């Protein structure tokens, strides 16, 4: 691992730029601590393994330590973006054998995009026109090939709409442009499988691991728009925002499905308490 | 358009790096002239239009002039890579309204990867394991989201194999990792439709437009591995290599389909003469 803690630029030859040959993590630090750091590091190791990058558990430990040192305990909330690209070289798409991973760190002050009142009320989501491609080789990974998300997020400018729901080419629900999604059906929270498309978020992973602590039941399954009518509640989640209740999903210009936000908001508070 | 003719780096905030939000062209210049420049520029305008970038015909004219000036007439063959990314800014995947296109130019001396003897003999191609995703919103475009190509090209290290054949998730033939592909069936050259996956190459486009000059018939259709047995000839093509005859395609570790290289080699010479 070549770690660049303060570098602001990459050469044009960088394979992340040239081919999207890389992956990234976006972590929230609160007073120098990222509660989900182990989940971020585990996902990095897993992504590296799947894409054939050299990024070992030791590299993850070294990176965690370096971030801990870089972000002071007395600092305000910060977003830390870690981008990993594959060492340049090789001919065209082919990478060099034994290529090192290049790890770039960026820090930004955290600016909450929602007030606590807005979170309690729940956000509005619309269904995006673009359908995600099916690609099992990349599904679940937070790689740098995000043009679908860019196209999806540019489908609307209405500030009242917070997120866009993404379906895959088969019409199955996958995620929103930058979050995972859960639906309350009966006593369980259902969330889409992500083995064909989508990003397996760190917050989603943490939730699935903490059923007992949260006194909830989560279930990974396949879901389509037809299932929305069965859902009483809905939330989106990611590692920066935590759990955000969804008030309604616009399925077309005229139609929408509304949800109770109570259960999702209660879960949101529970998660905040456990993760601070 | 913000044109960067000599910049060697981009900031980490560059959206091409962050999200693969961009596209590129790779052009071959011979003594200061790129015969396919109009095709490259037309593709850039088309890609920009489809992805919602601002890159007008005037921008294309300005870029062509700048490249002409930059690459001296007495220079050896050069490869010019032009990368276009969307101006940084906006929140996350969403781009800023009226974002400018940033155009980065890189030049490399051309190093032919095949001798004329190797071209005459034809190259070996293998069928890749990874299947390309179906994504009509991106099909045909030479965008920066090329992880599938990277994975495909890293499937083999055997130097005797020149290219990898890519099928889509439905098993249809699309292209090779960095070229388009044509098969001779009867009197016609058949090449895959690229409205579901793949890159619509500039050389492919030029060939389709010059049937009469070449005294050939080209036909765009759907093709699967089952069609290989019907093919007498095969070639791959791109704007750097021109037309390269294919000697055989390895469909598995034990099986391969062989082709006559005569017709493809004759076409290769014809194209070289017309395009010098």
Image (tube, coloured by chain):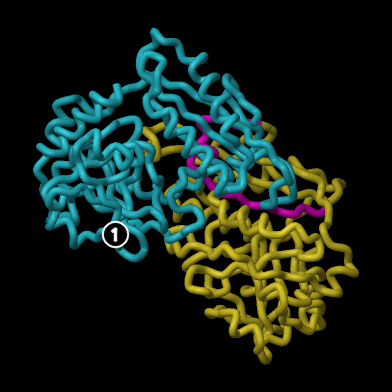
Chain colours: A yellow, B cyan
Q: Where A139 sits versus A29, above or below?
A: below
**Image-based side of A159 in relation to A53, left or right:** right
Q: Nearer the viewer, residue B64 or B9?
A: B64
Q: Residue at x 84, y 62 (%)?
A: A114
Is residue A3 rendered magenta in the image?
A: no
Q: Can residue A124 be seen in the rendering of this structure? A: yes
**Image-based side of A258 in relation to B123, left or right:** right
x and y percentages locating residue A227 in the rendered image: 60, 85
x and y percentages locating residue A161 in the rendered image: 77, 65
Image quadrant containing the C terminus of chain B: top left
**Image-based side of B124 in relation to A192, left or right:** left
Q: Residue at x 51, y 30 (%)?
A: B82
Q: Where B181 sits versus A15, above or below?
A: below
x and y percentages locating residue B133 in the rendered image: 42, 59
- Check disc 1 and report its element: helix, strand or loop: loop
The residues colored magenta run A9-30
Q: Where B135 sits versus B73, above or below?
A: below
Q: Can residue A11 be seen in the rendering of this structure? A: no
Q: Which residue is mark 1?
A: B222
């Amino acid at each position: 691992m070549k770690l660049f803690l303060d570098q602001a630029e990459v050469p044009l030859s960088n394979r992340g730029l040239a081919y999207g040959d890389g992956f990234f993590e976006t972590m929230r630090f609160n007073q120098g601590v990222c509660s989900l750091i182990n989940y971020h590091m585990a996902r990095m190791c897993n992504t590296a393994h799947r894409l054939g990058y050299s990024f070992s558990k030791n590299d993850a430990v070294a990176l965690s330590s370096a971030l801990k040192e870089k972000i002071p305990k007395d600092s305000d909330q910060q977003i830390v973006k870690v981008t990993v690209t594959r060492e340049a070289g090789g001919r065209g798409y082919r990478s060099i054998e034994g290529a090192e991973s290049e790890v770039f760190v960026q820090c930004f002050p955290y600016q909450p995009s929602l007030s606590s009142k807005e979170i309690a009320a729940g956000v509005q989501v619309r269904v995006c026109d673009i359908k995600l491609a099916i690609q099992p080789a990349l599904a679940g990974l937070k790689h740098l090939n995000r043009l679908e998300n860019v196209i999806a997020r540019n489908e609307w400018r209405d500030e009242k709409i917070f997120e866009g729901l993404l379906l895959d080419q088969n019409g199955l629900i996958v995620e929103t442009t930058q979050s995972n999604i859960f639906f309350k059906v009966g006593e369980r929270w259902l969330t889409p499988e992500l083995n064909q498309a989508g990003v397996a978020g760190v917050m989603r992973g943490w939730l699935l691991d903490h059923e007992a602590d949260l006194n909830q039941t989560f279930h990974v399954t396949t879901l389509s728009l037809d299932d929305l009518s069965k859902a009483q509640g809905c939330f989106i989640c990611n590692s920066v925002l935590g759990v955000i209740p969804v008030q309604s999903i616009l399925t077309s210009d005229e139609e929408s499905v509304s949800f109770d936000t109570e259960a999702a908001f209660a879960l949101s508070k529970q998660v905040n308490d456990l993760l601070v």
